[in-house]
Image: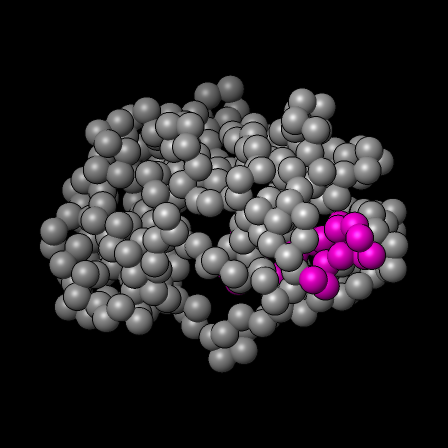
């Protein structure tokens, strides 16, 4: 069952100590539905991240103390904070319900890499968000004839790329307005499916297979060779090895649906990694997200008439 935005916010706020949770729960439902993150910084009052920026929490002006941060982490990880911290090399942990907690503190270095964190100084609790139907207005524009065109969703950080991609995966997998497709998801950071104890916390559709927690390049190849997908999806393509895996998949006739950080199509073309992907025709559609007075708008650019 898809949870409403206020319900997901209250689920995330329930991880907080009572003194912090109370003011969060007293926020009106409209504000709760718009909160993207809850920010807790030692020595500073709690803050909320909304589409228009960061703001304080009414009735919650006292600074957060280290004990608050430790308590939140213990509750969020079900008293397995030590285990979670030892796995936080990526800077965050995925929580039940699909919420994500970013963690800052003093890094413990082993063999040149962060292996643990101690003396936690701040937490960023990103509220899980599903927007059923978000991708519906653009779905028909992503096809080239009878085939899905490779699609790249583009925007600056925090503007809803992952949310849009998640709903697009669901629509493709469930066959909304078109025949259902098998979708393989390389979910390296656990944000798309948010698998918890083997069960995705987000609805990605009935014909979707998820490879979580391994590098995108590895996950894409495992899905390609083992699950016979018709579509491969991945969030935030950033590394050359990711691009190489996408090229191999496209050469096998699989459509690609991915996201990237960028200010626009011309910004992408100035960056060698993406220019190569565009020049080789891996993406026939680019979906740009822009914010207009706090409202997200989508623009679809057709790069070519033929599908990838």
Question: Relative to 215, is 2 above or below?
Answer: below
| Residue at point 65%, 26% (across, down) | 227
| Residue at point 28%, 50% (across, down) | 12
For residue 151: magenta?
Answer: yes
Question: Relative to 218, is 8 above or below?
Answer: below
Q: Position of residue 61 (x, y in %)?
A: 17, 65
Question: Relative to 82, is 69 above or below?
Answer: below
| Residue at point 40%, 41% (across, down) | 201
**Extreme residue toward the left, this view:** 19
Q: Which residues are magenta?
A: 140-162
User: Quarter of the image holding residue 19?
Assistant: bottom left
Residue 151 shows up from this direction: yes
| Residue at point 69%, 34% (across, down) | 229
Residue 272 shows up from this direction: no
Closest to the observer, 95 or 101: 95
Q: Position of residue 95 (x, y in %)?
A: 35, 39
Closest to the observer, 64 or 273: 273
**Extreme residue toward the top, this view:** 111
């Amino acid at each position: 069952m898809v949870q409403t935005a206020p319900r997901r916010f209250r689920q995330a706020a329930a991880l907080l100590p009572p003194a912090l949770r109370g003011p969060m729960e007293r926020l009106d439902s409209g504000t709760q539905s718009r909160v993207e993150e809850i920010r807790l910084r030692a020595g500073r009052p709690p803050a909320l991240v909304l589409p228009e920026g960061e703001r304080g929490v009414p009735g919650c002006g006292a600074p957060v103390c280290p004990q608050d941060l430790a308590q939140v982490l213990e509750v969020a990880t079900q008293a397995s904070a030590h285990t979670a911290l030892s796995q936080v090399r990526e800077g965050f942990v995925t929580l039940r319900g699909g919420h994500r907690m970013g963690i800052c503190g003093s890094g413990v270095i082993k063999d040149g890499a962060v292996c643990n964190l101690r003396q936690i100084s701040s937490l960023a609790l990103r509220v899980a968000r599903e927007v059923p139907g978000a991708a519906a207005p653009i779905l028909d524009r992503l096809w080239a004839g009878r085939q899905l065109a490779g699609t790249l969703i583009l925007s600056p950080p925090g503007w809803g790329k992952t949310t849009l991609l998640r709903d697009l995966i669901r629509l493709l997998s469930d066959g909304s307005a078109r025949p259902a497709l098998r979708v393989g998801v390389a979910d390296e950071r656990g944000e798309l499916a948010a698998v918890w104890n083997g069960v995705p916390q987000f609805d990605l559709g009935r014909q979707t297979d998820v490879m979580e927690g391994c590098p995108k390049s590895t996950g894409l190849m495992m899905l390609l060779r083992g699950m016979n997908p018709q579509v491969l999806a991945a969030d935030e393509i950033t590394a050359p090895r990711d691009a190489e895996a996408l090229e191999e998949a496209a050469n096998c006739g699989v459509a690609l649906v991915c996201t990237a950080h960028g200010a626009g199509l011309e910004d992408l073309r100035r960056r060698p990694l993406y220019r190569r992907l565009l020049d080789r025709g891996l993406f026939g559609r680019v979906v740009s997200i822009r914010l207009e007075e706090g409202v997200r708008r989508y623009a679809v650019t057709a790069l070519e008439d033929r599908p990838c």
